[in-house]
Amino acid sequence: EYIRSYYFNKMEDVRFSSSVGKYVGFTEQGVKNAEYWNKDASLLSGLRAQKETYCQHNIQIWYNNMLTKS
């Protein structure tokens, strides 16, 4: 799962989660930002692609490194 969180004053404001597929706001300002960012289809598709390009590409490497250190 790919997660991108934004914090303000040590509180989580907005989060993008690849399992949800969109931004979710946790504060009043975060909800406004999430609504605005969710309207941008190219932004959302780029973030969804991060899971495939970053996470799934590197998961086997990370898994193999964990096994060799245990």
Image (cartoon, helix red, strand yellow):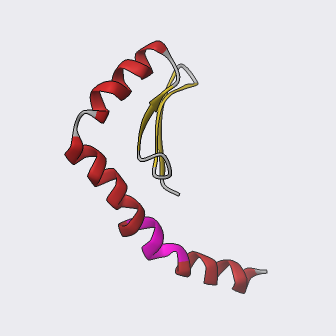
* Residue 65, horizontal then vertical, whole percent: 63, 81
* Residue 23, horizontal then vertical, whole percent: 41, 36
Placement of the C terminus among the 4 image quadrants = bottom right
Give the residue at x 48% y 46%.
20
User: Hey, which quadrant is residue 68 in on the image?
Assistant: bottom right
Give the residue at x 46% y 66%.
55
Q: Say which of 47 and 8 sits in front.
A: 47
Give the residue at x 43% y 22%.
30
- Tell me if residue 29 is in the magenta stretch: no
* Residue 52, horizontal then vertical, whole percent: 39, 67
Q: Say which of 11 and 24 sits in front.
A: 24
Q: What stretch is highlighted in magenta?
A: 54-59
* Residue 15, horizontal then vertical, whole percent: 47, 36
**Residue that protrudes farthest toward the top in the picture:** 28
Give the residue at x 47% y 74%.
58
Q: Say which of 58 and 16 sits in front.
A: 16
Count of marks overlaid on the render: 0
Q: In this view, does 46 lie above or below 53?
A: above
- Tell me if residue 56 is in the magenta stretch: yes
User: Hey, which quadrant is residue 57 in on the image?
Assistant: bottom left
Q: In this view, does 62 lie to the left or right of 20?
A: right
What secondary structure prevails in the magenta region?
A: helix
Q: Is residue 23 left or right of residue 45?
A: right
